Amino acid sequence: MELSVNYLGLIPLFPLMGAVIIGLLHVFTCNRTRLPEKVYGILACIGPILSFILALRVWVALKALPPESRFLTHDVFTWISVGEFNVSMGFLADPLACLFLLFVTFIGTLIHIYSIGYMSGDVNYGKFFAYMNLFLGSMLVLVLGDGPLVMFVGWEGVGLCSYLLISFYSEDRANVVAGNKAFIVNRIGDLGFVLGMAFLFWGIGSGGFDYLSLSVNADNLAPGIALAVCLLFFIGATGKSAQIPLYVWLPDAMAGPTPVSALIHAATMVTAGVYMVARFSFLYAGVELAGSVIAWVGILTALLAAIFAMYQDDIKKILAYSTVSQLGYMFAGVGVAAYSAGIFHVFTHAFFKALLFLGAGSIIYALHHEQNIWKMGGLKAKMPITYVTMVIGALALAGCPPFSGFFSKDEILYCAFATGHYGIWLVGIVVAAMTAFYTFRMIFIVFHGQARDQEKFDHAHEPPSVMTIPLIILAVGAIFAGFFNLPGVFGGNLMVSQWLEPSLTEVHPYTSTFVEIFVVVASIAAFAVGLKLAWSKYGQGATKPEFSGFSRFAYNKFYVDEAFDRVLVQPYRALGATIWKNIEPNVTDAPVKGASRLYMMLGNAFKVFQAGYVRVYAIYMVVGLSLMTLFLSQSLN
Amino acid sequence: MIHNYLFLSIILFCLGIVGVIARRNVFTVFMSIELMLNAGILALIAFARLHVHMDGHVLAMMVMAVAAAEAALALAVVILLHKHKSKLDTNVFSLLKG
């Protein structure tokens, strides 16, 4: 049934090796004459490119197999072996993993190429690429792992790399704080993941702890445990994929360099949560309650993040909240058991979000690290390539037909509608309109109207071609990626959904053509309304408005961060200080200090015998030998 | 007959012990140790003769050879000790005092 291929392990190995090589080069040369940047740039791109080529090979190999046995495996070595319990460092490529492999390596490669231009001149050029390669390698481990344990290795790896890269500009304390926040918030989610694994192992772990065995045994899991496992895994997913209530780290993660944001948002990290839920679709399909929770949390996250995005004035924060919002859609999709729709949105989102972030990076690069949209304006004339590609990305994000985002978002909304989740569909439509609004608010303010900061505007220029070419490639992807999964109403046959079928446990809901058309029309109407509002408000050039009332509340992100600080962080700190000042010296330290005092007393008592004179030791020896001889002669008789 | 040899051996050994414990001069201590060694050899030879066995003689020769080597080493140590403190009183060397 499964085919073993030995090149599977190489896919994550190439970027990981790149990370080691670049890291060592950087460490050994950073204090002497630096290597030219080209060396690092080329070394960094080799790993992702080789991985992409192997991903293509995996795809070809999978295509050659009959659909129901599309599994490639490779056990690299035995990782843990305790008695009966064996875990191997094994990799599994099925259609789901293959899809992720393809777009993760492809977009990862483009982002690496783009970074060659974006990061040029940075002191820690080598360190940056070492981390980037490590990030990509961890994500590939996560995707390729053949069980929850190997996935967890990658899961923690991306968490670590996000921390390293978010606080990359570590001279500024705020960036370090942002990195810490991302790491700590992710740890909370990781706890859910670990507990979920423990429950899953307790339930059906004895039959093997890889996906294939687990999916066979999934029916034996008691319903209560299944619910617990599903919800705990979802807590893990809320951490990685930035859902309520753990989304707070993602906007702060904008402290990192822009290509990092692109990598986190498009190819690695945040898609891990959606991937995990889809991976465990055999569990989630049997627990309807967990699905509903996920769908509602997802769509409410989408709504909340869209509200925040409408009021932000940092270009990267707008995009960050749009990612949170789109991730909400994905979770709504997997929540209503439309796993392939959710995964397809991950796929298209990877293209247009990478495009938007890299475009934003171009702007930031051109304006010398200016991120405030109220200091931009009229950049259309200065940066035509960036403008066109960003508009394409914006159209895809806002869900304008026939751009990619439209089809994937529509598929999610259709599945929600067709499975009877009308509330989720309705919120989804509202969020779609808001998405169009905030996306084009950004585009209009940045590119249209008059220059708001004349000095910055005069210095703006199109970035070098090493940065614009990835933009163009991604723009092509953002236009056409949607055509891979055309639904029946547009004359397609859901190619991606069919491709993913062997990996997922789902039933595609079929309703009448009328419903399909109704949903499509509603989506297009939502887009049109959002676009119209954005144009009327910001199309002709606008200045930063004064916020009051609700908009002020939303501008400050509902004070969620402050509330977390007040409710969780401050009491926790107070508790820590209490323990540190009162309990530690009196309760925990006392026995330790007492023990040391006891030993000192004993030592002082025995000190008397250590006279220091040879004669005295000789006496001890004679006495001891005599006693021993006496004892021996007694016992012999 | 063997008793006489063993009594002599015991007397020599006890003299050696008393010498090690009671005397403070490093040389005297060292000589006392040699005395104890030779007391042991004497007992060994006596038993070897009693049992008409050559192993005891061989062992005695070995012990004497080792004692000679030890003497060479110990004398060097004594010289170093003298260099260190210009005295040969064992009570002066009490660095191990607790």
Image: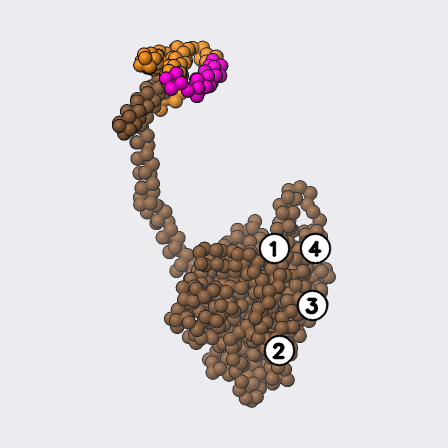
Chain colours: A brown, B orange
User: Which quadrant is home to the C terminus of chain A?
Assistant: top left
**A634 sits to left or right of A188:** left
Give me the C-alpha separation between circle 3 and circle 1: 25 Å
Q: Earlier in the sequence, mark 2 or mark 1?
A: 1
State yes or no: residue A546 in magenta: no
Q: Are marks 3 and 4 in contact (CB under 8 Å)?
A: no
Chain holding disc 3 = A
The residue to which callout 1 is attached is A16
Q: Are marks 3 and 2 in contact (CB under 8 Å)?
A: no
Chain holding disc 2 = A
Image depth: mark 2 or mark 4 in front: 2
Label 1 and label 4 in one chain: yes
Label 2 and label 1 in one chain: yes
The residue to which callout 4 is attached is A42
Q: Amino acid at mark 2?
A: Met
The residue to which callout 2 is attached is A495
Give me the C-alpha separation between circle 2 and circle 1: 32 Å
**A433 sits to left or right of A559:** right
Q: Amino acid at mark 3?
A: Ile
